[in-house]
Image (tube, helix red, strand yellow):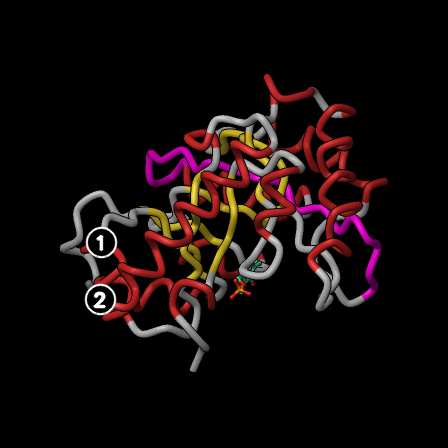
Amino acid sequence: MSTIAARLAELRSRIAVAASASGRDPAAVALVAVSKRQPASAVREAWEAGQRVFGENYAQELVAKAAELADLDGLVWHMIGHLQTNKARAVAPLAHMVETIDSPALAAELGKRATALGRVLHALVEVNVAGEASKSGCSEAALGAVVAAVRATPGLALRGLMTMPPLSDDPEASRPHFARLRALRERHGGAAALPELSMGTSHDFEVAVAEGATLVRVGTALFGARA
Ligand SMILES: *Cc1c(COP(=O)(O)O)cnc(C)c1O
């Protein structure tokens, strides 16, 4: 077994254990393999081991990798990095889901580009739950307006919320931020309207699963250190 295949198997079992431990169905948690600054060959290796959903942070890197990996059946891209409106055009033909919509303007631009292509992009609204000045994502105060904008935009299908908590060495430090995202979902339509919660990375995904994550975004624990 390749290293990536072995790590993938281990990650899947850790996700399943975390889900079961909190009374959740392991099938309700999907792994987004974060391939930013990893070579296309690593994505190919993970795909060969059965992984299908990959996350990229930079539009140009997504464009290059998608071209290089166009032969891989069933491969699905999530845009998980901060997206400037002028990059919407590059991302709209390639992404299955954009996890980082944080303004009505970005929603409008993505919707326009998707509609022109006859596509519907799955959409998450990114929330800056900790209120960090340096972070992307909308504020809690702006969330209602961004959610409403995505809902009203042809070419976008609102699926849920995403967050990236402050960096910390302690996975437990992320728990209140993950719980906060879940609470915000209740305030903005609940799980029926917003089924997806994207939260948790290599070091804190088990905490995120315990707090209700349906998508965990794992990079280094699968691929190793980034270039
Ligand atoms: C890089 C990144 C991840 C993955 O982080 P790892 O620590 O490598 O697991 C997840 N989410 C976002 C938004 C990222 O930028």
Amino acid type at mark 2: Ser
Identify the disc placed on residue 2: 2
Assess whether mark 1 and mark 2 are in contact (beta carbons under 8 angstroms). yes
Q: Nearer the viewer, residue 151 or 48?
A: 48
Point out residue 105 in the picture as x, y percentages from the top left corner.
65, 46
The quarter of the picture where the N terminus appears is bottom left
Residue 131 is inside the magenta segment: yes
Name the residue located 78 percent from the left edge and 48 percent from the top edge: 129
Name the residue located 59 percent from the left edge and 17 percent from the top edge: 192
Q: Nearer the viewer, residue 23 or 174?
A: 23
Element type at marker 1? loop
Point out residue 109 in the picture as x, y percentages from the top left corner.
54, 46
Q: Nearer the viewer, residue 214 or 131?
A: 214
Name the residue located 52 percent from the left edge and 55 percent from the top edge: 80
Element type at marker 2? loop
Identify the disc placed on residue 80: none
Point out residue 170 in the picture as x, y percentages from the top left corner.
73, 63
Q: Which residues are magenta?
A: 115-133
User: Between marks 2 and 1, how big is the CA–CA gap?
Assistant: 9 Å
Q: Earlier in the sequence, mark 2 or mark 1?
A: 2
Q: Is mark 1 within 8 Å of ligand 1?
A: no
Identify the disc placed on residue 49: 1
Residue 189 is inside the magenta segment: no
Amino acid type at mark 1: Ala
Q: Quadrant of ligand 1?
A: bottom right
Point out residue 194 in the picture as x, y percentages from the top left corner.
60, 26
The quarter of the picture where the C terminus appears is bottom left
